[in-house]
Image (spheres, helix red, strand yellow):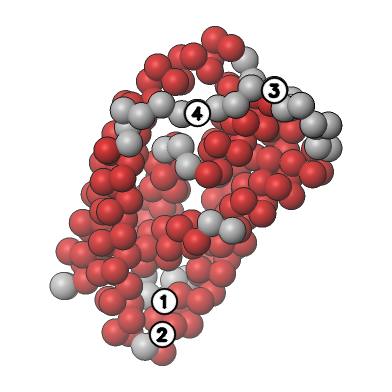
Amino acid sequence: MDLIVSIILILGSLLAGAVSPGPSFLLVAKTAMGHSRQNGVAAAMGMGAGSVLFSALALMGLSVVFTRIPVLYFSLKITGGAYLICLAYQIWTGAGKGVVLSGKHTRRPPTPAGSFFTGLGTQLSNPKTALVYAGIFAALLPAKPPPLIYFILPPLIFTVEAGWYTFVALMLSSAMPRAAYLNSKSLFDRIAAAAMAGLGLKLISDSSV
């Protein structure tokens, strides 16, 4: 049961981070608005694929390091917690700012495959994503996670990440849903910031146990 709770908390934390606009959000939004809904969904799939790679690397790397050097487990909790709190502050203070989305592109639209690899590259080139994954896993997974976690967590993370960005692509490729989201952006950002801050505080608190 504890493992199920940990997985739910991990997925919820990642979703909270994804909801707040960043490079990944902007790429999917601009692709869907500037090219086509199909291209936006393809970019979302690329984001999901990148998340699977990050999660697999974080699971393997953290498990090995934490087993051999337990003190790093607690050190990462402190630094990861501080980072997540800083990220929460940035999200909160930027909640009132608008999202600048360009209109139609003048160049030839990319193929869906091209949009997929653009999304994948954008996700993998963002170092903050790796830090967030490391911090969240350190907070919510045991130092020696059960082998089952390696098989069930990455596909679930793909579903959450790709699912959210697919929703973004579908929503922002239509005028009325796009306006509704932009009008509610401040609320979404503050919810995401509160979730990130809570997780960061949990990391720091657990490191002293």
Q: Nearer the viewer, mark 1 or mark 4?
A: 4
Q: Amino acid at mark 3?
A: Lys
Q: Amino acid at mark 4?
A: Val
**Residue with the mark numbered 4:** 100
**Residue with the mark numbered 3:** 104
Residue 134 in picture, x, y percent from top left: 42, 65
Position of 205 with respect to 75 (left or right) is: left
Report the front residue among 62 and 130. 130
**Residue with the mark numbered 2:** 67
Q: Earlier in the sequence, mark 3 or mark 2?
A: 2
Q: Determine the secondary structure under disc 4.
A: loop
Q: Earlier in the sequence, mark 1 or mark 3?
A: 3
Above or below for 18 versus 61: above
Q: Are discs 3 and 2 less than 8 Å apart at CB? A: no
Q: Are discs 1 and 3 less than 8 Å apart at CB? A: no
Quick check: can you spot residue 153?
no
- Which of the 4 quarters of the picture holds residue 164? top right
Residue that lies at the very extreme toward the front in this rendered image: 106
Q: Are discs 1 and 2 less than 8 Å apart at CB? A: yes
